[in-house]
Image: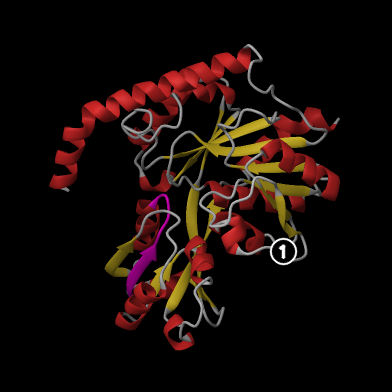
Amino acid sequence: MKLLKIFYIVLFPLLFFCSLIYRLILKLKEFLYKKNILIRKRATSTKIICVGNITVGGTGKTSTVIYLANELIRKGYKVVILTRGYKRKKKSDEPFILSDGQQILRTIQESGDEPYMLAKKLKYIPVIVGRKRYLSACLAIEKFGPDIILMDDGFQHTELERDLDIVMIDCLNPFGNNYLLPLGILREPLIALKRAKIVVLTNCNFVNWVRLNFIINKITGINRGIKIIRTAHKPCSITNYTTNEIYDINWLRDKSVVLLHAIGNPKSFELTIESTGAKILNNYRFLDHHWYRKKELKKILMKYEYIITTEKDAVRIENIDNLDKKLLSKLFILNIELEDHGILIDTVEKLLSNSFV
């Protein structure tokens, strides 16, 4: 930790300079769009909801997309999900159908881990992967004719017009040190929250009311009319990786476990496991979107009895061939759900209601 601080202090002037350059690039881009020098925003015939971040790292965005997709389907809407496919191994400029709502048509290498997880969790909802969101939306409309398109991680995307922007903010680390990349974790200045209609605060259960009020006041100071939804990502069950047997979350209480994860917000996962009453023997943290190697995974599985991982990590582990099933039976997946008492979907419906008249 000390070495990290020294490294940060030494590099601060360079990172600060780079952060200023990044801010200037964002300003220039905004100016060029306003003057219609860059591609104008393009609308589609379908209503589009974007779920995105203003920071890098995990904020519970994927869980929220899953929650919204399920709720919209339950209410009778036809839904398609668009996602970029960040950190996929096989890259293509053309959008493609990962899932047609009946079966998965591509590999995890082609789609990336998050889109693949969405396709597995939402088997009845089409998922389209592509960097060019407008082309992805056109493909979705042509092939599936949805009522609503859910765009995963597109708040900074400027070409495709949206009807509703939802921004995820993690209460454990809402704004970092308030600096833009690469000095901080902000993708753009906080003033960008003026574009959003809803902010979803995640991990509210891990901060006190003073911290929570500070975050809320900071957001409403930028955008007074914004709707703020407080949520928690609650652990609901544990699934054995090999047998698919599901255990109640109380199964973890007093068990000695090891954590294995490569996600954007490791602290949230760690605190969630702690909240179940489990005893953490060891904690294997890898960089977000890490592709596990057979050798490193086998070493961990051989050493411990109970290894807990995330749903996103589990789809990446599937990619490893010829791993012993007996070893994999030691691996358990934490299942979480968004707890908001139905407020988010009600707010979304109210904001979109005029569009469906």
Task: Look at the image and say whether residue 259 sits in the magenta stretch.
Answer: yes
Answer yes or no: is residue 276 visible.
no
Query: Going by the image, does 225 lie left or right of 278?
Result: right
Question: Residue 128: percent from the left, percent from the top?
Answer: 70, 50
Question: Residue 126: percent from the left, percent from the top?
Answer: 74, 55
Nearer to us in this view, 42 or 92: 92
Q: How is the image coloured?
A: secondary structure
Residue reaching furthest top?
35
Query: Going by the image, does 162 lie left or right of 255?
Result: right
Question: Residue 190: percent from the left, percent from the top?
Answer: 45, 24
**Residue with the mark numbered 1:** 105
Residue type, mark 1 in image: Leu
Q: Is residue 121 above or below residue 220?
A: below
Question: Residue 316: percent from the left, percent from the top?
Answer: 50, 65
Dot 1 falls on a residue whose secondary structure is: loop
Q: Quadrant of the C terminus?
A: top right
Query: Going by the image, does 155 lie left or right of 59?
Result: right
Q: Residue at x 35, y 52 (%)?
A: 267
Residue 215 lies in quadrant: top left
Task: Look at the image and say whether residue 176 sits in the magenta stretch.
Answer: no
Q: Residue at x 60, y 46 (%)?
A: 84
Residue reaching furthest bottom?
326
Q: Is residue 257 above or below residue 140?
A: below
Q: Residue at x 80, y 48 (%)?
A: 78
Answer yes or no: is residue 92 visible.
yes
Q: Magenta part of the protein: which range?
A: 255-265
Nearer to us in this view, 128 or 255: 128
Q: Residue at x 42, y 81 (%)?
A: 330
> Number of numbered discs present?
1
Residue 343 lies in quadrant: top right
Nearer to us in this view, 36 or 72: 36
For mark 1, does the 10 Å Cα neighbourhood hold few (<14), some (14 to 19), or many (20 or more) residues? few
